[in-house]
Amino acid sequence: MQTHEQETLEEEGGPPIFKSWNQMYAFVLILHAIIIVLFYLFTHAYA
Amino acid sequence: MHLLDWIVMLGTLLTIVAYGVWKTRSVKSVQSYLLGDRDLPWWTIGLSIMATQASAITFLSTPGQAYEDGMRFAQFYFGLPVAMVFLSIFVLPIYYKLKVYTAYEYLEGRFDLKTRTMTAILFLVQRGLAAGLTIYAPAIILSSILNWPLTPTTLFIGVIVIFYTVMGGTKAVSVTQKQQMIVILTGMFIAAVILVFQLPKDVSFSDAVGVAGKMGKLNVVDFNFDLSNRYTFWSGMLGGVFLFVSYFGTDQSQVQRYLSGKSLTESRLGLLFNGILKVPMQFLVLFVGILVFVFFQFNHPPVHFNTANVDNLKGTEYESQYNQYSEQYAQLNEQKELEVRQMIQAMRTEDDATLTAAQSRYENIHQQENQIREEVKELISTQNPAAKTQDTDYVFITFVTTYLPMGLVGLLLAVIFSAAMSSTSSELNALATTTVIDIYRRSLAPDKSDQHYLNASKLFTILWGVTALIFALVANLFDNLIEAVNIIGSLFYGVILGIFVVAFFMKRIKGSAVFVAAIVSELFVIAIFTMSNYGIISIAYLWLNLIGCILVMIFSQLFSMIRR
Protein backbone atom coordinates (compact mmCIF):
# COMPACT_ATOMS: atom_id res chain seq x y z
CA MET A 1 0.00 0.00 0.00
CA GLN A 2 1.32 3.45 -0.88
CA THR A 3 1.67 6.18 1.73
CA HIS A 4 0.40 9.73 1.15
CA GLU A 5 3.97 10.80 0.70
CA GLN A 6 4.75 8.26 -2.00
CA GLU A 7 1.59 9.14 -3.92
CA THR A 8 2.43 12.83 -3.80
CA LEU A 9 6.04 12.23 -4.74
CA GLU A 10 4.93 10.49 -7.90
CA GLU A 11 2.86 13.53 -8.82
CA GLU A 12 5.51 16.06 -7.89
CA GLY A 13 8.74 14.42 -9.00
CA GLY A 14 12.04 14.46 -7.19
CA PRO A 15 14.15 17.32 -5.89
CA PRO A 16 16.15 19.44 -8.36
CA ILE A 17 19.64 18.44 -7.25
CA PHE A 18 19.37 14.80 -6.14
CA LYS A 19 17.75 11.67 -7.51
CA SER A 20 15.35 11.20 -4.61
CA TRP A 21 13.97 13.10 -1.64
CA ASN A 22 15.66 10.64 0.71
CA GLN A 23 19.02 11.71 -0.71
CA MET A 24 18.02 15.35 -0.27
CA TYR A 25 17.08 14.76 3.40
CA ALA A 26 20.34 12.85 3.95
CA PHE A 27 22.23 15.80 2.43
CA VAL A 28 20.58 18.26 4.86
CA LEU A 29 21.23 16.03 7.88
CA ILE A 30 24.83 15.22 6.91
CA LEU A 31 25.51 18.91 6.29
CA HIS A 32 24.06 19.67 9.72
CA ALA A 33 26.28 17.00 11.28
CA ILE A 34 29.34 18.51 9.54
CA ILE A 35 28.40 21.97 10.86
CA ILE A 36 28.14 20.59 14.42
CA VAL A 37 31.54 18.86 14.06
CA LEU A 38 33.05 22.14 12.81
CA PHE A 39 31.49 23.99 15.77
CA TYR A 40 32.96 21.35 18.09
CA LEU A 41 36.42 21.77 16.57
CA PHE A 42 36.01 25.57 16.79
CA THR A 43 35.05 25.30 20.48
CA HIS A 44 38.07 23.14 21.28
CA ALA A 45 40.54 25.06 19.12
CA TYR A 46 39.97 28.22 21.18
CA ALA A 47 39.18 26.72 24.59
CA MET B 1 20.79 60.45 14.74
CA HIS B 2 22.24 61.99 11.59
CA LEU B 3 20.10 62.95 8.59
CA LEU B 4 21.87 60.32 6.45
CA ASP B 5 20.85 57.61 8.94
CA TRP B 6 17.22 58.74 8.75
CA ILE B 7 17.38 58.63 4.95
CA VAL B 8 18.93 55.15 4.91
CA MET B 9 16.53 53.78 7.53
CA LEU B 10 13.31 55.25 6.17
CA GLY B 11 14.43 54.74 2.56
CA THR B 12 15.10 51.04 3.14
CA LEU B 13 11.89 50.39 5.05
CA LEU B 14 9.57 52.39 2.82
CA THR B 15 11.12 50.99 -0.38
CA ILE B 16 10.43 47.46 0.84
CA VAL B 17 6.84 48.35 1.76
CA ALA B 18 6.23 50.16 -1.55
CA TYR B 19 7.69 47.19 -3.46
CA GLY B 20 5.46 44.78 -1.51
CA VAL B 21 2.32 46.81 -2.17
CA TRP B 22 3.16 47.30 -5.86
CA LYS B 23 4.01 43.63 -6.35
CA THR B 24 0.66 42.54 -4.86
CA ARG B 25 -1.58 45.14 -6.51
CA SER B 26 -3.33 42.42 -8.53
CA VAL B 27 -4.53 40.44 -5.49
CA LYS B 28 -8.26 40.23 -6.12
CA SER B 29 -9.45 36.87 -4.76
CA VAL B 30 -9.53 35.34 -1.30
CA GLN B 31 -7.27 32.46 -2.43
CA SER B 32 -4.80 35.02 -3.72
CA TYR B 33 -5.06 37.07 -0.52
CA LEU B 34 -4.70 34.19 1.94
CA LEU B 35 -2.51 31.76 0.02
CA GLY B 36 -0.73 34.12 -2.37
CA ASP B 37 -1.98 32.19 -5.45
CA ARG B 38 0.27 29.36 -4.31
CA ASP B 39 2.97 30.50 -6.72
CA LEU B 40 5.96 31.27 -4.50
CA PRO B 41 9.37 29.73 -5.27
CA TRP B 42 11.39 27.92 -2.61
CA TRP B 43 13.85 30.71 -1.85
CA THR B 44 11.01 33.16 -1.11
CA ILE B 45 9.35 30.55 1.14
CA GLY B 46 12.65 29.77 2.90
CA LEU B 47 13.47 33.44 3.57
CA SER B 48 9.86 34.07 4.60
CA ILE B 49 9.98 31.21 7.14
CA MET B 50 13.25 32.55 8.55
CA ALA B 51 11.91 36.12 8.70
CA THR B 52 8.76 34.99 10.53
CA GLN B 53 10.76 33.24 13.24
CA ALA B 54 13.37 35.99 13.62
CA SER B 55 11.78 38.90 15.44
CA ALA B 56 13.50 42.18 16.31
CA ILE B 57 14.32 40.77 19.71
CA THR B 58 16.39 38.06 17.97
CA PHE B 59 18.74 40.72 16.63
CA LEU B 60 18.72 42.86 19.78
CA SER B 61 18.98 40.11 22.40
CA THR B 62 21.08 37.42 20.77
CA PRO B 63 24.31 39.46 20.39
CA GLY B 64 23.81 40.63 24.00
CA GLN B 65 23.40 37.03 25.08
CA ALA B 66 26.70 36.10 23.38
CA TYR B 67 28.35 39.13 25.02
CA GLU B 68 27.26 37.92 28.45
CA ASP B 69 27.10 34.14 28.13
CA GLY B 70 29.12 33.10 25.05
CA MET B 71 27.90 31.18 22.03
CA ARG B 72 26.25 28.16 23.66
CA PHE B 73 22.78 29.48 22.74
CA ALA B 74 23.48 28.23 19.15
CA GLN B 75 22.71 24.71 20.43
CA PHE B 76 19.08 25.72 21.01
CA TYR B 77 18.64 25.52 17.20
CA PHE B 78 20.38 22.15 16.66
CA GLY B 79 17.05 20.30 16.44
CA LEU B 80 15.70 22.62 13.73
CA PRO B 81 17.16 20.90 10.61
CA VAL B 82 15.87 17.53 11.90
CA ALA B 83 12.43 19.09 12.46
CA MET B 84 12.44 20.48 8.89
CA VAL B 85 13.18 17.02 7.47
CA PHE B 86 10.49 15.47 9.69
CA LEU B 87 7.87 18.02 8.55
CA SER B 88 8.87 17.59 4.89
CA ILE B 89 8.36 13.84 5.12
CA PHE B 90 5.28 13.50 7.32
CA VAL B 91 3.31 16.76 7.62
CA LEU B 92 3.72 18.76 4.42
CA PRO B 93 2.33 16.01 2.09
CA ILE B 94 -0.82 15.79 4.23
CA TYR B 95 -1.47 19.55 4.13
CA TYR B 96 -0.84 19.58 0.36
CA LYS B 97 -3.00 16.58 -0.34
CA LEU B 98 -5.94 18.17 1.50
CA LYS B 99 -5.26 21.61 -0.08
CA VAL B 100 -5.93 23.34 3.24
CA TYR B 101 -5.67 27.09 3.95
CA THR B 102 -4.89 26.59 7.65
CA ALA B 103 -3.40 23.87 9.84
CA TYR B 104 -6.68 23.73 11.79
CA GLU B 105 -8.71 22.98 8.66
CA TYR B 106 -6.93 19.63 8.53
CA LEU B 107 -8.30 18.81 12.00
CA GLU B 108 -11.90 18.85 10.76
CA GLY B 109 -11.16 16.16 8.19
CA ARG B 110 -9.17 14.12 10.69
CA PHE B 111 -11.50 14.66 13.68
CA ASP B 112 -14.54 16.96 13.52
CA LEU B 113 -15.68 20.59 13.37
CA LYS B 114 -15.69 21.20 17.12
CA THR B 115 -12.04 20.09 17.48
CA ARG B 116 -11.04 22.33 14.58
CA THR B 117 -12.88 25.34 16.00
CA MET B 118 -11.55 24.86 19.52
CA THR B 119 -7.92 24.56 18.30
CA ALA B 120 -8.32 27.64 16.08
CA ILE B 121 -9.67 29.66 19.03
CA LEU B 122 -6.79 28.54 21.27
CA PHE B 123 -4.36 29.69 18.57
CA LEU B 124 -6.14 33.05 18.14
CA VAL B 125 -6.01 33.83 21.88
CA GLN B 126 -2.37 32.88 22.21
CA ARG B 127 -1.04 34.49 19.01
CA GLY B 128 -3.34 37.51 19.26
CA LEU B 129 -1.75 38.48 22.58
CA ALA B 130 1.78 37.73 21.38
CA ALA B 131 1.43 39.96 18.29
CA GLY B 132 1.24 43.06 20.50
CA LEU B 133 4.46 42.12 22.25
CA THR B 134 6.27 41.60 18.92
CA ILE B 135 5.69 45.31 18.29
CA TYR B 136 6.18 46.52 21.87
CA ALA B 137 9.45 44.73 22.74
CA PRO B 138 11.70 46.41 20.11
CA ALA B 139 9.85 49.74 20.47
CA ILE B 140 10.70 50.01 24.18
CA ILE B 141 14.40 49.24 23.57
CA LEU B 142 14.75 51.63 20.61
CA SER B 143 12.93 54.42 22.42
CA SER B 144 15.15 53.99 25.50
CA ILE B 145 18.41 54.11 23.57
CA LEU B 146 17.53 56.71 20.93
CA ASN B 147 15.39 58.85 23.21
CA TRP B 148 12.48 58.45 20.83
CA PRO B 149 9.03 58.75 22.39
CA LEU B 150 7.55 55.27 22.88
CA THR B 151 4.07 55.84 21.43
CA PRO B 152 5.17 57.16 17.99
CA THR B 153 7.83 54.39 17.75
CA THR B 154 5.18 51.75 18.45
CA LEU B 155 2.74 53.38 16.02
CA PHE B 156 5.43 53.61 13.32
CA ILE B 157 6.03 49.85 13.38
CA GLY B 158 2.35 48.92 13.82
CA VAL B 159 0.76 51.22 11.24
CA ILE B 160 3.22 50.32 8.44
CA VAL B 161 2.79 46.59 9.07
CA ILE B 162 -1.00 46.82 9.16
CA PHE B 163 -0.95 48.89 5.95
CA TYR B 164 0.96 46.49 3.72
CA THR B 165 -0.46 43.31 5.29
CA VAL B 166 -4.00 44.57 4.65
CA MET B 167 -3.13 45.70 1.12
CA GLY B 168 -1.47 42.55 -0.18
CA GLY B 169 -2.24 39.72 2.26
CA THR B 170 0.00 36.65 2.32
CA LYS B 171 1.85 37.56 -0.86
CA ALA B 172 2.75 41.00 0.51
CA VAL B 173 4.00 39.34 3.69
CA SER B 174 6.19 36.85 1.79
CA VAL B 175 7.48 39.34 -0.79
CA THR B 176 8.43 41.95 1.83
CA GLN B 177 9.92 39.27 4.09
CA LYS B 178 12.29 38.25 1.29
CA GLN B 179 13.58 41.83 1.02
CA GLN B 180 13.59 42.30 4.80
CA MET B 181 15.61 39.12 5.30
CA ILE B 182 18.15 40.26 2.68
CA VAL B 183 18.48 43.61 4.55
CA ILE B 184 18.80 41.77 7.89
CA LEU B 185 21.51 39.34 6.73
CA THR B 186 23.42 42.07 4.86
CA GLY B 187 23.22 44.44 7.85
CA MET B 188 24.45 41.83 10.33
CA PHE B 189 27.29 40.79 8.01
CA ILE B 190 28.37 44.44 7.56
CA ALA B 191 28.21 44.93 11.35
CA ALA B 192 30.56 41.95 11.79
CA VAL B 193 33.01 43.32 9.20
CA ILE B 194 32.95 46.83 10.72
CA LEU B 195 33.57 45.35 14.17
CA VAL B 196 36.69 43.60 12.90
CA PHE B 197 37.94 46.82 11.27
CA GLN B 198 37.26 48.83 14.44
CA LEU B 199 39.56 46.68 16.57
CA PRO B 200 42.86 48.38 17.51
CA LYS B 201 45.45 48.27 14.72
CA ASP B 202 47.74 45.97 16.69
CA VAL B 203 44.93 43.45 17.33
CA SER B 204 44.20 41.05 14.47
CA PHE B 205 41.00 39.08 13.86
CA SER B 206 42.81 35.94 15.01
CA ASP B 207 43.86 37.72 18.24
CA ALA B 208 40.25 38.79 18.81
CA VAL B 209 38.93 35.23 18.40
CA GLY B 210 41.74 33.93 20.60
CA VAL B 211 40.88 36.41 23.38
CA ALA B 212 37.18 35.45 23.22
CA GLY B 213 38.15 31.77 23.39
CA LYS B 214 40.39 32.27 26.43
CA MET B 215 37.49 34.00 28.18
CA GLY B 216 35.23 31.02 27.56
CA LYS B 217 32.97 32.81 25.06
CA LEU B 218 33.38 30.38 22.13
CA ASN B 219 31.58 27.50 23.82
CA VAL B 220 29.42 26.59 20.82
CA VAL B 221 29.06 22.85 21.52
CA ASP B 222 28.76 21.08 24.86
CA PHE B 223 28.25 17.30 24.69
CA ASN B 224 27.85 16.86 28.48
CA PHE B 225 24.43 15.48 29.38
CA ASP B 226 23.22 17.75 32.18
CA LEU B 227 19.50 18.35 32.69
CA SER B 228 20.15 21.49 34.75
CA ASN B 229 22.12 23.04 31.86
CA ARG B 230 19.69 24.79 29.54
CA TYR B 231 21.88 24.78 26.42
CA THR B 232 23.70 21.56 25.54
CA PHE B 233 23.88 19.45 22.39
CA TRP B 234 21.37 17.05 23.95
CA SER B 235 18.80 19.65 25.04
CA GLY B 236 19.03 21.20 21.56
CA MET B 237 18.63 17.91 19.73
CA LEU B 238 15.96 16.35 21.97
CA GLY B 239 13.95 19.33 23.23
CA GLY B 240 14.66 21.35 20.08
CA VAL B 241 13.17 18.81 17.65
CA PHE B 242 10.00 18.63 19.78
CA LEU B 243 9.73 22.41 20.00
CA PHE B 244 10.40 23.13 16.32
CA VAL B 245 8.13 20.38 14.99
CA SER B 246 5.31 21.91 17.04
CA TYR B 247 6.12 25.51 16.09
CA PHE B 248 6.64 24.97 12.35
CA GLY B 249 4.02 22.22 12.01
CA THR B 250 1.06 23.66 13.93
CA ASP B 251 1.50 27.43 14.24
CA GLN B 252 -0.47 29.05 11.41
CA SER B 253 2.00 31.98 11.15
CA GLN B 254 4.56 29.42 9.89
CA VAL B 255 2.22 26.95 8.17
CA GLN B 256 0.84 29.76 6.01
CA ARG B 257 4.34 30.59 4.77
CA TYR B 258 5.04 27.19 3.24
CA LEU B 259 1.45 26.54 2.10
CA SER B 260 1.85 29.45 -0.32
CA GLY B 261 4.47 27.51 -2.28
CA LYS B 262 4.17 26.85 -6.02
CA SER B 263 4.21 23.08 -5.39
CA LEU B 264 4.98 20.51 -2.74
CA THR B 265 8.54 20.43 -4.07
CA GLU B 266 8.98 24.21 -3.65
CA SER B 267 7.52 24.14 -0.12
CA ARG B 268 9.75 21.24 0.87
CA LEU B 269 12.81 22.99 -0.53
CA GLY B 270 11.79 26.16 1.38
CA LEU B 271 11.65 24.23 4.66
CA LEU B 272 14.96 22.48 3.95
CA PHE B 273 16.55 25.81 2.97
CA ASN B 274 15.55 27.08 6.42
CA GLY B 275 16.99 23.88 7.94
CA ILE B 276 20.34 24.48 6.23
CA LEU B 277 20.63 28.25 6.82
CA LYS B 278 19.13 28.78 10.28
CA VAL B 279 21.97 27.37 12.41
CA PRO B 280 24.75 29.23 10.51
CA MET B 281 22.64 32.43 10.71
CA GLN B 282 22.31 32.11 14.48
CA PHE B 283 26.06 31.46 14.62
CA LEU B 284 26.65 34.71 12.70
CA VAL B 285 24.36 36.72 15.01
CA LEU B 286 26.02 35.26 18.11
CA PHE B 287 29.47 35.83 16.62
CA VAL B 288 28.60 39.51 16.14
CA GLY B 289 27.94 39.55 19.90
CA ILE B 290 31.37 37.98 20.52
CA LEU B 291 33.02 40.65 18.35
CA VAL B 292 31.14 43.33 20.32
CA PHE B 293 32.53 41.70 23.49
CA VAL B 294 36.11 41.85 22.17
CA PHE B 295 35.53 45.40 20.91
CA PHE B 296 34.51 46.48 24.41
CA GLN B 297 37.75 45.09 25.81
CA PHE B 298 39.53 47.96 24.03
CA ASN B 299 36.73 50.57 23.98
CA HIS B 300 35.32 51.09 27.41
CA PRO B 301 31.64 50.21 27.72
CA PRO B 302 29.18 52.02 29.99
CA VAL B 303 28.67 50.49 33.43
CA HIS B 304 24.99 50.05 32.53
CA PHE B 305 23.77 49.74 28.94
CA ASN B 306 20.18 50.97 29.34
CA THR B 307 20.67 54.74 29.11
CA ALA B 308 17.07 55.43 30.13
CA ASN B 309 17.76 53.82 33.53
CA VAL B 310 20.93 55.86 33.91
CA ASP B 311 19.17 59.09 32.90
CA ASN B 312 16.60 58.47 35.63
CA LEU B 313 19.37 58.55 38.24
CA LYS B 314 20.53 62.00 37.13
CA GLY B 315 19.42 64.82 39.41
CA THR B 316 18.51 62.39 42.20
CA GLU B 317 20.29 61.64 45.46
CA TYR B 318 21.79 58.55 43.77
CA GLU B 319 23.63 60.44 41.02
CA SER B 320 26.92 60.94 42.88
CA GLN B 321 26.95 57.28 43.92
CA TYR B 322 26.38 56.29 40.30
CA ASN B 323 29.22 58.56 39.13
CA GLN B 324 31.55 56.91 41.62
CA TYR B 325 30.66 53.46 40.35
CA SER B 326 31.07 54.65 36.79
CA GLU B 327 34.59 55.98 37.49
CA GLN B 328 35.62 52.80 39.30
CA TYR B 329 34.31 50.79 36.39
CA ALA B 330 36.29 52.86 33.87
CA GLN B 331 39.49 52.37 35.92
CA LEU B 332 38.95 48.61 36.05
CA ASN B 333 38.41 48.64 32.29
CA GLU B 334 41.79 50.26 31.76
CA GLN B 335 43.46 47.61 33.91
CA LYS B 336 41.56 44.91 32.07
CA GLU B 337 42.70 46.20 28.69
CA LEU B 338 46.33 45.87 29.81
CA GLU B 339 45.73 42.26 30.84
CA VAL B 340 44.03 41.50 27.52
CA ARG B 341 47.02 42.91 25.63
CA GLN B 342 49.34 40.76 27.78
CA MET B 343 47.22 37.73 26.96
CA ILE B 344 47.44 38.46 23.23
CA GLN B 345 51.22 38.87 23.45
CA ALA B 346 51.48 35.61 25.42
CA MET B 347 49.34 33.77 22.86
CA ARG B 348 51.56 35.02 20.05
CA THR B 349 54.75 33.89 21.78
CA GLU B 350 53.06 30.75 23.14
CA ASP B 351 54.14 31.73 26.64
CA ASP B 352 51.70 29.66 28.69
CA ALA B 353 52.87 30.84 32.11
CA THR B 354 52.33 34.53 31.26
CA LEU B 355 49.01 33.69 29.61
CA THR B 356 47.72 31.86 32.68
CA ALA B 357 48.83 34.65 35.01
CA ALA B 358 47.21 37.36 32.83
CA GLN B 359 44.04 35.27 32.55
CA SER B 360 43.86 34.93 36.31
CA ARG B 361 44.30 38.69 36.84
CA TYR B 362 41.70 39.34 34.13
CA GLU B 363 39.20 37.08 35.90
CA ASN B 364 39.78 38.93 39.14
CA ILE B 365 39.14 42.31 37.51
CA HIS B 366 36.13 40.91 35.68
CA GLN B 367 34.59 39.78 38.97
CA GLN B 368 35.08 43.25 40.45
CA GLU B 369 33.44 44.74 37.37
CA ASN B 370 30.48 42.41 37.70
CA GLN B 371 30.09 43.41 41.31
CA ILE B 372 30.01 47.11 40.35
CA ARG B 373 27.46 46.38 37.62
CA GLU B 374 25.27 44.63 40.19
CA GLU B 375 25.63 47.59 42.60
CA VAL B 376 24.50 49.96 39.83
CA LYS B 377 21.49 47.75 39.11
CA GLU B 378 20.60 47.84 42.77
CA LEU B 379 20.91 51.63 42.74
CA ILE B 380 18.54 51.78 39.76
CA SER B 381 16.06 49.47 41.53
CA THR B 382 16.22 51.53 44.71
CA GLN B 383 15.51 54.74 42.81
CA ASN B 384 12.75 53.11 40.73
CA PRO B 385 11.54 49.70 41.96
CA ALA B 386 9.65 49.14 38.67
CA ALA B 387 12.77 49.58 36.49
CA LYS B 388 13.99 46.60 34.47
CA THR B 389 17.70 46.31 35.31
CA GLN B 390 18.59 43.47 32.93
CA ASP B 391 20.56 45.32 30.21
CA THR B 392 21.91 42.63 27.86
CA ASP B 393 19.25 43.50 25.24
CA TYR B 394 20.81 46.98 25.05
CA VAL B 395 24.43 45.90 24.42
CA PHE B 396 24.29 45.56 20.62
CA ILE B 397 22.12 48.62 20.00
CA THR B 398 24.50 50.67 22.21
CA PHE B 399 27.39 49.60 19.98
CA VAL B 400 25.36 50.40 16.83
CA THR B 401 24.32 53.89 17.90
CA THR B 402 27.66 54.85 19.50
CA TYR B 403 30.36 53.37 17.28
CA LEU B 404 29.02 52.63 13.80
CA PRO B 405 29.77 55.17 11.05
CA MET B 406 27.10 57.50 9.72
CA GLY B 407 24.68 55.74 7.36
CA LEU B 408 25.31 52.30 8.83
CA VAL B 409 23.44 53.27 12.00
CA GLY B 410 20.41 53.81 9.75
CA LEU B 411 20.98 50.46 8.03
CA LEU B 412 21.22 48.56 11.34
CA LEU B 413 18.09 50.29 12.64
CA ALA B 414 16.40 49.22 9.41
CA VAL B 415 17.51 45.66 10.29
CA ILE B 416 15.77 45.88 13.68
CA PHE B 417 12.59 47.43 12.23
CA SER B 418 12.56 44.93 9.34
CA ALA B 419 12.74 42.05 11.79
CA ALA B 420 9.90 43.53 13.87
CA MET B 421 7.73 44.09 10.80
CA SER B 422 8.41 40.71 9.20
CA SER B 423 7.37 38.68 12.24
CA THR B 424 4.38 40.92 13.03
CA SER B 425 3.05 40.79 9.46
CA SER B 426 3.11 36.98 9.53
CA GLU B 427 1.22 36.97 12.80
CA LEU B 428 -1.49 39.37 11.60
CA ASN B 429 -1.84 37.46 8.34
CA ALA B 430 -2.19 34.14 10.19
CA LEU B 431 -4.67 35.58 12.71
CA ALA B 432 -6.88 36.97 9.92
CA THR B 433 -6.69 33.75 7.91
CA THR B 434 -7.62 31.56 10.88
CA THR B 435 -10.47 33.89 11.85
CA VAL B 436 -11.94 33.91 8.33
CA ILE B 437 -11.34 30.29 7.29
CA ASP B 438 -11.83 28.40 10.55
CA ILE B 439 -14.47 30.52 12.28
CA TYR B 440 -16.17 33.07 10.04
CA ARG B 441 -16.55 31.21 6.73
CA ARG B 442 -16.94 27.77 8.32
CA SER B 443 -19.41 28.54 11.12
CA LEU B 444 -20.70 32.12 11.05
CA ALA B 445 -21.20 33.13 7.40
CA PRO B 446 -20.93 30.18 4.98
CA ASP B 447 -21.76 30.36 1.26
CA LYS B 448 -20.95 34.00 0.67
CA SER B 449 -19.17 35.37 -2.39
CA ASP B 450 -15.40 35.35 -2.88
CA GLN B 451 -15.42 39.18 -2.71
CA HIS B 452 -17.24 39.00 0.63
CA TYR B 453 -14.52 36.76 2.15
CA LEU B 454 -11.78 38.92 0.62
CA ASN B 455 -13.26 42.00 2.32
CA ALA B 456 -13.74 40.04 5.55
CA SER B 457 -10.06 38.94 5.42
CA LYS B 458 -8.94 42.57 5.06
CA LEU B 459 -11.26 43.69 7.84
CA PHE B 460 -10.02 40.99 10.23
CA THR B 461 -6.40 41.88 9.40
CA ILE B 462 -7.18 45.48 10.40
CA LEU B 463 -8.99 44.34 13.57
CA TRP B 464 -6.15 42.07 14.68
CA GLY B 465 -3.62 44.77 13.77
CA VAL B 466 -5.43 47.39 15.81
CA THR B 467 -5.82 44.93 18.72
CA ALA B 468 -2.07 44.21 18.64
CA LEU B 469 -1.29 47.90 18.41
CA ILE B 470 -3.52 48.81 21.37
CA PHE B 471 -1.95 45.98 23.34
CA ALA B 472 1.54 47.26 22.44
CA LEU B 473 0.60 50.82 23.44
CA VAL B 474 -0.70 49.85 26.90
CA ALA B 475 1.93 47.13 27.56
CA ASN B 476 4.16 49.71 29.25
CA LEU B 477 1.50 50.40 31.87
CA PHE B 478 1.53 46.91 33.33
CA ASP B 479 4.64 45.56 35.02
CA ASN B 480 4.07 41.88 34.51
CA LEU B 481 2.22 41.94 31.22
CA ILE B 482 4.99 40.32 29.16
CA GLU B 483 5.31 37.46 31.60
CA ALA B 484 1.52 37.12 31.70
CA VAL B 485 1.39 36.77 27.91
CA ASN B 486 4.14 34.15 27.95
CA ILE B 487 2.24 32.25 30.63
CA ILE B 488 -1.02 32.40 28.66
CA GLY B 489 0.90 31.07 25.63
CA SER B 490 2.24 28.15 27.66
CA LEU B 491 -1.25 27.40 29.00
CA PHE B 492 -2.52 26.74 25.46
CA TYR B 493 0.45 25.78 23.30
CA GLY B 494 0.97 22.29 24.76
CA VAL B 495 -2.69 21.35 24.28
CA ILE B 496 -2.66 22.58 20.65
CA LEU B 497 0.45 20.52 19.96
CA GLY B 498 -1.10 17.50 21.70
CA ILE B 499 -4.15 17.64 19.40
CA PHE B 500 -1.89 17.63 16.31
CA VAL B 501 0.33 14.84 17.65
CA VAL B 502 -2.77 12.69 18.17
CA ALA B 503 -4.03 13.64 14.68
CA PHE B 504 -0.77 12.70 12.95
CA PHE B 505 0.37 9.67 14.90
CA MET B 506 -2.51 8.09 16.84
CA LYS B 507 -4.62 7.05 13.90
CA ARG B 508 -7.30 5.16 15.86
CA ILE B 509 -8.33 8.14 18.00
CA LYS B 510 -11.54 9.84 16.85
CA GLY B 511 -12.82 13.42 17.22
CA SER B 512 -14.92 13.17 20.38
CA ALA B 513 -12.11 11.48 22.34
CA VAL B 514 -9.51 14.12 21.43
CA PHE B 515 -12.00 16.97 21.99
CA VAL B 516 -12.84 15.85 25.55
CA ALA B 517 -9.17 15.02 26.16
CA ALA B 518 -8.15 18.54 25.09
CA ILE B 519 -10.69 20.18 27.44
CA VAL B 520 -9.73 17.94 30.38
CA SER B 521 -6.02 18.48 29.67
CA GLU B 522 -6.51 22.25 29.51
CA LEU B 523 -8.26 22.14 32.91
CA PHE B 524 -5.38 20.07 34.29
CA VAL B 525 -2.83 22.54 32.90
CA ILE B 526 -4.73 25.49 34.44
CA ALA B 527 -4.99 23.59 37.76
CA ILE B 528 -1.25 22.82 37.77
CA PHE B 529 -0.50 26.46 36.98
CA THR B 530 -2.85 27.67 39.76
CA MET B 531 -1.36 25.27 42.34
CA SER B 532 2.11 26.37 41.30
CA ASN B 533 1.02 30.00 41.63
CA TYR B 534 -0.14 29.40 45.21
CA GLY B 535 3.07 27.53 46.08
CA ILE B 536 1.36 24.13 46.55
CA ILE B 537 3.65 22.60 43.90
CA SER B 538 6.64 24.03 42.04
CA ILE B 539 6.61 23.74 38.25
CA ALA B 540 8.07 26.39 35.93
CA TYR B 541 5.43 27.52 33.43
CA LEU B 542 7.55 26.51 30.41
CA TRP B 543 7.02 22.87 31.40
CA LEU B 544 3.27 23.36 30.88
CA ASN B 545 3.91 23.03 27.11
CA LEU B 546 5.20 19.50 27.51
CA ILE B 547 2.64 18.56 30.20
CA GLY B 548 -0.29 19.79 28.07
CA CYS B 549 0.87 17.81 25.04
CA ILE B 550 1.43 14.56 26.93
CA LEU B 551 -1.88 14.87 28.81
CA VAL B 552 -3.83 15.22 25.54
CA MET B 553 -2.16 12.07 24.20
CA ILE B 554 -2.83 10.05 27.36
CA PHE B 555 -6.44 11.22 27.84
CA SER B 556 -7.24 10.72 24.13
CA GLN B 557 -6.07 7.12 24.36
CA LEU B 558 -7.97 6.62 27.61
CA PHE B 559 -11.27 8.12 26.40
CA SER B 560 -10.99 6.24 23.14
CA MET B 561 -10.63 2.93 25.01
CA ILE B 562 -13.61 3.76 27.27
CA ARG B 563 -15.82 4.58 24.25
CA ARG B 564 -14.95 1.28 22.60
Image (cartoon, coloured by chain):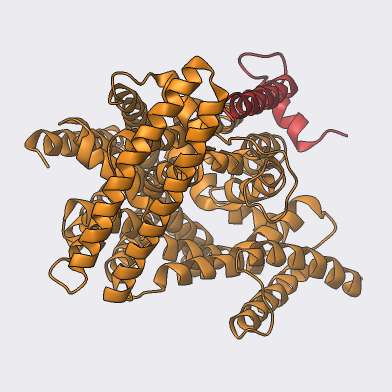
Chain colours: A red, B orange
How far across and how far down the image is residue B407, in percent?
Answer: 16, 31
Say which residue appears at 58% left-offset and 50% top-offset: B247
- Residue name at image x 43 percent, y 66 percent: B129
Estimate the x, y position of residue B419 in percent, counting from the top left: 36, 43
Q: Give the side of residue A36 with respect to residue B68, left or right.
A: right
Measured along the vertical axis of the image, is residue B449 above or below residue B552?
Answer: above
The answer to whether residue B313 is seen in the rendering is: no
* Figure quadrant of residue B285: top left
Image coordinates of residue B68 in percent, x first then y, are: 45, 47
What is the count of numbered marks? 0
Indicate the quadrant containing the N terminus of chain A: top left, top right, bottom left or bottom right.
Answer: top right
Nearest to the observer: residue B31 or residue A33? A33
| Residue positioned most to the left | B3
Q: Is residue A6 above or below residue B74?
A: above
Q: Is residue B509 left or right of residue B16?
A: right
Horizontal arrangement in the rendering, residue B446 relative to residue A20 (left or right): left
Q: From the image, which quarter does the C terminus of chain A lie in?
A: top right
Residue B190 seen: yes
Q: Residue at x 76, y 63 (%)?
A: B550
- Using the image as rendered, state which of residue B347 and residue B178 is in the foreground: B347
Judging depth in this view, the residue of B97 and B118 nearest the camera is B118
Q: Is residue B564 above or below residue B96?
A: below
Q: Position of residue B168 (x, y in %)?
A: 32, 43
